[in-house]
Image (tube, helix red, strand yellow):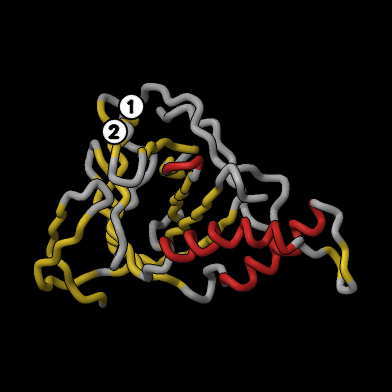
Amino acid sequence: MSFLLVASLGVAGCAHEEPILIDDVKYFEGDMPADFSGFWTRDYTRSDDMDKVLLNAYYELGRKNANRGAMGPVASQRDMSLLMPLARLVDLITRTDTLTISQTEYEILVERKDDFSLLCAFFDGVAKPTDNAFGKETCGWDGNRLISVTDLSDGLRVVHRFETSEDRKQLRVITTASSKTAPMPFTLMHHYWRIEKVPGKYECIETLSMKRVCSTGGLPR
């Protein structure tokens, strides 16, 4: 009933976890393991703070490389200079405060305000990789968690993990970027509340695959 997904997630400050890898995706039958459809708004009180995550990464790199300063483990200037591009990328692509998720029998479309969309396509029970202007996106399932992996140029990988609460009122999105040159992956975790919308104007956005997607927008209530 689910994809076979060999996956674990690297979180800055958590040395025991590694970046997600999808090694094998198999056939599944029935409904998708979870329903993410709806309108979602950011819960800033529970979401990660960029400065705190960077500070944790600073100390984690210091412990990893056994570098110590007067205040304890410290990262080298070189390690931080290699990590910062990943941190900036994750911060940029998770900056949106609202998500609109549409879900059908075959696709899950995550529309992000003022940013490109994520598209997970499934045909005959198998995840179908989607090519776009930036790279290739592949999706899978880790239990009832949706995993989206986008492989970009030069060994850069961006992973999004989506998980809802049992009552579908809350959504957690964990985003990780990793590369061959960075000393460790960088991760930010954000929480969202499900909201209702009243009908509004007709809105269009450009998706990552450079296709124009239009929908009826609205105001949250």
Which secondary structure, mark 1?
strand
Residue 158 shows in the view: yes
Relative to the observer, which residue lies in front, 218 or 169? 218
Q: Quadrant of residue 171?
A: bottom left
- Residue occupying image coordinates x 46% and y 57%: 173
Please tell me whether residue 205 is drawn above or below residue 149 in the rendered image: below
**How crowded is the residue under tag 2: few (<14 C-alpha within 10 Å), some, or many (20+)?**
some
Residue 149 shows in the view? no
Disc 2 and disc 1 in contact, CB within 8 angstroms? yes
| Residue farthest toward the left in the current orientation of the protein | 202
Quadrant the C terminus occupies: bottom left
Give amino acid for label 1. Val
Disc 2 marks a residue whose amino acid type is Phe
Q: Residue at x 31, y 69 (%)?
A: 195
Placement of the N terminus among the 4 image quadrants: top left
Above or below for 56 versus 20: below
Between marks 2 and 1, how big is the CA–CA gap? 5 Å
Expressed as whole percent of the image width and height from the top left, the position of residue 47 reads 52, 69
Q: Position of residue 31 (x, y in %)?
A: 31, 35
- Asked whether 24 or 136 is in front, the reply is 136
| Residue holding disc 1 | 126
160 on left or right of 82: left
At horizontal 58% and vertical 55% (from top left) the residue drawn is 186
Q: Which mark is residue 122?
A: 2
At 36% from the left edge and 25% from the top edge, which residue is drawn? 28
- The label shown at residue 31 is none
